[in-house]
Image: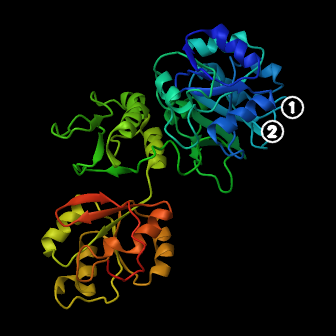
Amino acid sequence: METIVKADVEWAARLLEQGEVVAIPTETVYGLAANALDESAVEKIFQLKKRPKEDPLIVHVSGIEALERLEIEPPLWAERLMRLFWPGPLTILLPKGPKIPLLVTAGLERVALRAPAHSLTHALLQRLSFPLAAPSANPFGFISPTTPAHVLSYFQGQVPFILDGGPCAAGIESTIIGEEQGRFILYRPGALPREVIEEALGDRLFLKTGPSKAPVTPGQYPRHYAPSKPLLYGWHTLPVEPRASLVYFSAQVPSSHPYVHVLTPQGSVEEAAHHLYAILHACEAEPTDYILVEKVGGVGGLVEALHDRLRRAHTRSIFTIGHSNHAWVDFMKLIHRYEIQAVVDLRRQPYSKYVPHFSQGYLQKSLHEAGIAYEWQPNPKRLFLLLEKLFAQYLHIVLLCAEGDPTRCHRFRLADELTEMGLAVFHILPEGRLELHRAPISLALGKKA
């Protein structure tokens, strides 16, 4: 199949009327669109994206007048928001009405609705006699596309047409809200800031971004919007690693590193949102092993949405470090360089005959004084449960695992097992460099190579 890329609304409309899936631009990101009232067409979206059927889709309409044809009657609060912010990056969860298939809503009785602001897609929706189900035009969980080239990189030869609307203006997905038991809920922070919506509602939005069992709206999976290579978010000071793509929030960057990106040269969160996915796509294409992203600065506006996307793109990761040839001051320099928040001591003996400052009592006291948590867990069978507990509190956790040889633990099967569990394992080498764990060693824990 040839994929045509063209700014031709009529061409896109004819294909959609034939039950095909086409990529469409919005002001937020590009979407994979199909007739929302045609279950066989919607099924193609799920197949193309490899998207779980329990993850509902957003239905795109031309405006508030389209709801009557769908037999959906919005409550007064929703109608007010639609008249204020549609077309625009606001998605509202409402009772679905009888015409919307349950496949679209993942079997739920509410449907996510929005009217996109992009001129081409608005014209397309006015031309069509049906609404469009249109999740982002990327394989499930991957980086959202903000240009036709991004869509083509994912689905060339798989979709017949991409409606070329140029780069997306906002660059980050819509805000999703709804009502539960008289409270207004923010399900996904997005391109319309919560403060603007709260002012219009005259009421507070309560955050509910993670499902208790299954998603009630799109974008609620913990791991989402992510590149295939590991991404570590939340750094206060990025370590300038030679094997990393470095993403800074502001313009203070080292000029010597070959793979440096800046989300906002002008210091604007709107600019950062516009650049976010394009920069992550660029990092994905670079000959690097992983991506380090500086914490987004500021409060309010789109900061909440940027945090949300980067936290979901963040790879759960573990660091390892040896100690036997480290003076205490050098050890702590590495701990601070990699912004370690918790140390898990894997040594079988809680003392060190040859390096007294690594005996458990001294180590625990010194780490506590530095504001770093300490746990001792010599039993690898219990380690995974401990890590699950620590992940709920800490972003950067290090395994202290060398007994005598500082490289010994790095070759244990443990690193392989953690990698197989979906974690990224980074070895902190004595010279102060990160090495992403790759090759399986397949040694029993405790045996030397």
| Residue 387 percent across, percent down from the top left | 46, 70
Q: Label 1 neighbourhood size at 10 Å, few (<14), some (14-19), many (20+)?
A: few
Q: In this view, does 27 lie above or below 138?
A: above
Would you name the residue on which mark 2 appears? 102
Disc 1/disc 2 C-alpha distance (Å): 9 Å
Q: Is residue 378 above or below residue 72?
A: below
Tell whether 238 sits left or right of 27. Answer: left
Q: Which residue is drawn at 73% across and 22% down?
A: 131
Q: Give the label on residue 98, or none.
A: 1
Q: Which amino acid does label 1 sit on?
A: Pro
State the quadrant of the N terminus. top right
User: From the viewer's perspective, is 154 left or right of 398?
Assistant: right
Q: In this rendering, does residue 392 appear at all?
A: no
The quarter of the displayed image where residue 332 is located: bottom left
Horizontal relation, residue 71 to residue 110: left or right? right
- Crowd tier of the residue under label 2, counting other residues whose Cα lies within 10 Å: few below 14, some 14–19, many 20 or above: some
In front: label 1 or label 2: 2
- Mark 1 lies on a secondary structure that is loop
Q: Quadrant of residue 8?
A: top right
Residue type at mark 2: give it. Answer: Leu
Where's the C terminus, which quadrant? bottom left
Which residue is nearer to you in this view: 203 or 330? 330
Asked if residue 193 is positioned above or below residue 230 in the image, the reply reads above
Spot occupied by residue 442 in the image (x, y as percentages of width and height): 43, 73
Mark 2: secondary structure: loop
Q: Where is residue 273 in the image (x, y as percent from the top left)?
A: 42, 32
Residue drawn at x 19%, y 91% as measured from the top left:
353
